[in-house]
Structures are given as C-alpha cells and as structure tokens.
Amino acid sequence: MIAAFLEGCGGDSTTEPTGSGGGSTATVRGQVVTDRAGTAAEPVLVVALQRLAGVGLAEAQVADTPLAGTTVTLTCDSGLSALTRTDRSGRFLFENVPSGVCTLTVEQDGVRAPGEIPVVVGAGDTADVTGRVTPRGLSGTVTVSVDDVGAVTRNDVQLGIAINIANASTARASGRAACDLEAVIDLREQRLGWGEIAHRCGVDPRVIGLGRSDLSDDDLRAARERLGRDRGRGAAA
C-alpha cells in the first residue's frame, strides 16, 4: 500500500496552500518528502530492501524528494479538520489553527500513508513540520517557534493559555515546584511553544485548547495587574 502511495505522488500539482493567520491562532506549515529513488525503475521498496541488506548502499542512498500533490489533513481536538494539497515543492500551509492538540496525516489518490505526526500548538505559535514517507509509513519532526513573545501579555487568548497552564501546574504540584503565572510567562519569553511549556510545567497539553474560554475579563485584568506588580517589584529589587 505504501508503495502505491509513493508511486502516486507526481510532480504536476499546481495547487497552492491558502489561509490567513492571526495572533489568537497558530500556523502549521511544512513539507512532505520521501527518500525514494528519483525514477520508476527503482521502486521505493527495492531501495529500502537494499538498505536493510546492506547491498548497493551507494546507489540506494538518495536525497529527499518532495511529494507534490499530496493531500495533507490536520485534525485537532478543537474540532478542526482541514486539508490542503502540497505544492510542487511538497510544501503545505495551514493558518488560523485554533489552539490544541492536533495530528497530521497524508494521503495520495485515496491511499493514506500509515502513521501520523502529533502537533501541539497554541495562539501565536508557528509549527514547522517535516513529514517523511518511507516504506514503514509516515514519520516527522516538528519545531515550534514564536515570533512575538510580547503578545503573551497583550493578547487575551495567549494570556488565557498562560493562566490555564499555571493553574493546572499548581493543582498538580503535589510536593514539587509548580509553574506560577510569572514562570509560564518567562518560559514564553524564551520563545518556547505552548506545548513545550506545558511539558516543562508537567501539565496535560490539552489545557492549551481552553484558551481564555473559562476566564472572564476580570480574570485577565487581575492577571495583568498581578504581573505588573510582580515585575515592578523585581525591577526595584
């Protein structure tokens, strides 16, 4: 099945990913590639077997090949289910992605590559994904970056995520150090994605998807005032 998937990925697609972003949402972008040989005379399964057997390694080792015209689907616990097709360079783009825990899958002509790539993003995050299709299926790497670290205190959704992580960390502390709101903000200002911050604070990343939904305007106002006081004392010390 995976061989059929790979052989169905041609280079004639002209479909360009579309979308528009925002400071209260995330961006997921990337590229889908394979390490198959560049011609139909060298099917990907043959190349893989050569590698496993240690035969013809010099001939079998080839550079990553972009998979054009591949359908990429992003499914999130926020309820989002979106799809796009890769361009000629194998690249794809999703913008306006709500905060939460997502999975990314790829398929070609109705054949889905086995496996999925987990992607955790929150408001203001940009996730760069490299999806690699091999005879074993789909695997990948995800790197999350943050362009505007100052937005965490200005943007209601981002501040809500920080408050929810701090509250969840405090509730789960049980004898170990918890991440208070100041600590969460400090981690964000180190340009860490929300998923990594949740991990470091020992909380379920699904709290990221709450955004500010459980918080009133008064909650946000009080958090900003508390942060202002704490940082003012720190500057004076």
Image (cartoon, rainbow, N blue to C red):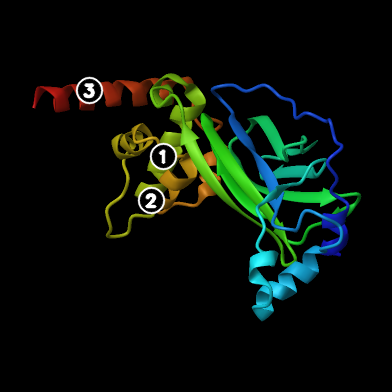
Is residue 223 in view?
A: yes
Residue on which disc 3 sits: 229
Residue at 85% across / 45% down in the picture? 10
Give the alpha-carbon distance from disc 2 to disc 1, as whole Å.
10 Å
Give the amino acid type for the residue marked by disc 2 in the picture: Arg
Residue at 30% across / 20% down in the picture? 225
List x then y, in percent, for residue 102. 64, 46
Place residue 88 in its image quadrant: top right
Give the amino acid type for the residue marked by disc 3 in the picture: Arg
In the foreground, 64 or 72: 64
- SS of the residue under disc 2: helix
Give the amino acid type for the residue marked by disc 1 in the picture: Leu
Q: Quadrant of the N terminus?
A: bottom right
Which mark lies nearer to you, 2 or 3?
A: 2
- SS of the residue under disc 1: loop
Residue on which disc 1 sits: 192
Residue 105 falls left or right of residue 173: right
Which mark lies nearer to you, 1 or 3?
A: 1
Along the polypeptide, which appears first: circle 2 or circle 3?
2
| Residue 200, label in figure | 2
List x then y, in percent, for residue 98. 63, 33
Residue 57 falls left or right of residue 110: left
Along the polypeptide, which appears first: circle 1 or circle 3?
1
In the foreground, 134 or 222: 134
| Residue 149, label in figure | none
- SS of the residue under disc 3: helix
Residues at marks 1 and 3 touching, judged by CB atoms closer than 8 Å: no
Q: Residues within 10 Å of mark 2 (few under 14, many from 20)?
A: some
List x then y, in percent, for residue 217. 47, 20
Along the polypeptide, which appears first: circle 2 or circle 1?
1
